Amino acid sequence: MREPDMQKLDELVGRLVNDVGAAMSGALVVLGDQVGLYRAMADGVPRTVAELSARTDVRERYLQEWLSAQAAAGYVTFDDGNQTFSLTPEQAMIFADENSPAYFVGAFDIVQSMWMDEPKVADAFRSGKGVGWHEHSTCLFRGTERFFRTGYNAHLVNEWIPSLAGVSERLEQGGHVADVGCGHGASTILMAKAFPAARFTGFDYHGPSIDRAKVAAEEAGVSDRVTFRQSAASDYSASDANGGYDLVTMFDCLHDMGDPVGAARHVRDTLAEGGTWMIVEPFAHDRLKDNLNPVGRVYYGASTMICTPASLSQDVGLGLGAQAGEMKLRKVAMDAGFQHFRRATETPFNMVFEARSARVQAH
């Protein structure tokens, strides 16, 4: 047996202590969100445990422990002189404001589902079978919408769509958009608000998500121009759009599909003349060694527990994974018959691609 390097061992143990603390803090974030503690602290006013207890109707003894743990994590701020707890403006943006471009609580809903569904994934590891999206705990669906909506709010209308050649102008004049894999409809609704002259149809195979999306559209006041339908990516209908869709979007879902090439062919077939396919995927480099960083760690974790099992549960089961990279995604588009494919823009968390068929001159 090889002798361990004690310094390296100590360093690894130190990282594990941080990781265990982060895992525990994640559960406390979900708890604080569900009980309404962050919202009660959103105004930034320093309060004692007793004052926060009266404001939230949470028992003091529980609140003391939760606040102490959150302060140790740096998620809330503790003033030793006054024995008060508060949220800084930055902490409030992350934990208390769902419309903030930095809101992060939804990520912990996703992590919760990974813990809850671990036995199913463990069985899949042994059998080689997949775990369908619909087989996961409901907190995954809620968390996905809440987490990804943050990025869409920050980038979709102001950066991503304008990065596509001529698309903003086309939607401002009207046109029809298919949002495939729309989930709870956050991206569909956001686009509908930005382009009131256009019409939008959101498709998702998961019935409960479509039901929630319909309610969300009513709440947002866009149901006059948004329709949601339950349908798979490989056979959604173009009947709502005369002559095909001007824009087909897929947000963070292509890599989850068992047959992404087949889905891409269907996109090509349902696009209008001069139409565009926008693919938004998790940021990744093509080589593994270049993804060994904090963002890659998050995405490989989600890919192991959610994305790859979802793909392997379907026909073909290509299993792209959440860190497919541009080269593999380009191959999907090329194999489907698209001849124009480019990275239009990116963020630290996402890559945005523009694909068009051979009948459209490349830009």
Image (tube, grey):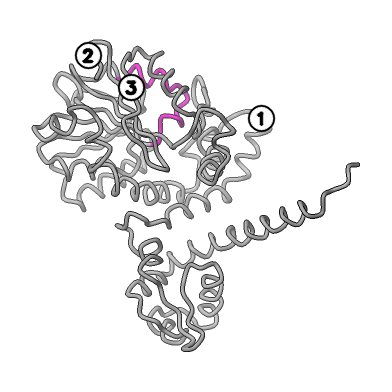
Label 1 sits on a secondary structure element that is: helix
Circle 3 sits in a helix, a strand or a loop, which is it? Answer: loop
Examine the rendered structure and indicate whether residue 331 appears above or below residue 71. Answer: above
Asked whether the residues under the numbered discs 3 and 1 touch, taking CB atoms below 8 Å apart as contact, a structural biologist would say no
For the point 44% across and 18% down, which residue is it?
Answer: 331
Please tell me whether residue 253 belongs to the stretch shown in magenta: yes
- Give the residue number, with chain letter if any, for mark 3: 235
Tell me what residue is drawn at x 39 percent, y 14 percent: 334
Residue type indicated by callout 2: Gln
Mark 2 secondary-structure assignment: loop
Q: CA distance from mark 3 to mark 1?
A: 29 Å
- Report how far apart the C-alphas of labels 1 and 2 lie in the structure: 47 Å
Residue 309's disc is none
Other-residue count near label 1 (Cα within 10 Å), few / some / many at <14 / 14–19 / ≥20 = few
Horizontal arrangement in the rendering, residue 200 relative to residue 329 (left or right): left
Q: Is residue 115 located in the magenta-colored stretch of the structure?
A: no
> From which residue to which does the magenta span run?
252-267
Judging depth in this view, the residue of 24 and 77 nearest the camera is 77
Question: Badge 3: how crowded within 10 Å, few (<14), some, or many (20+)?
Answer: few
Q: Is residue 320 above or below residue 118?
A: above
Label 3 to label 2: alpha-carbon separation? 27 Å
Residue 109 pos. (x, y %)? 47, 54
Q: Which mark is residue 127?
A: 1
Asked where in the image residue 198 lies, by quadrant, the reply is: top left
**Of the residues under marks 1 and 2, which one precedes in the sequence?**
1
* Location of mark 2 (residue): 361
Quadrant of the frame with the N terminus: top right
Report the label total. 3
Residue 149 horizontal/vertical position (percent): 33, 48
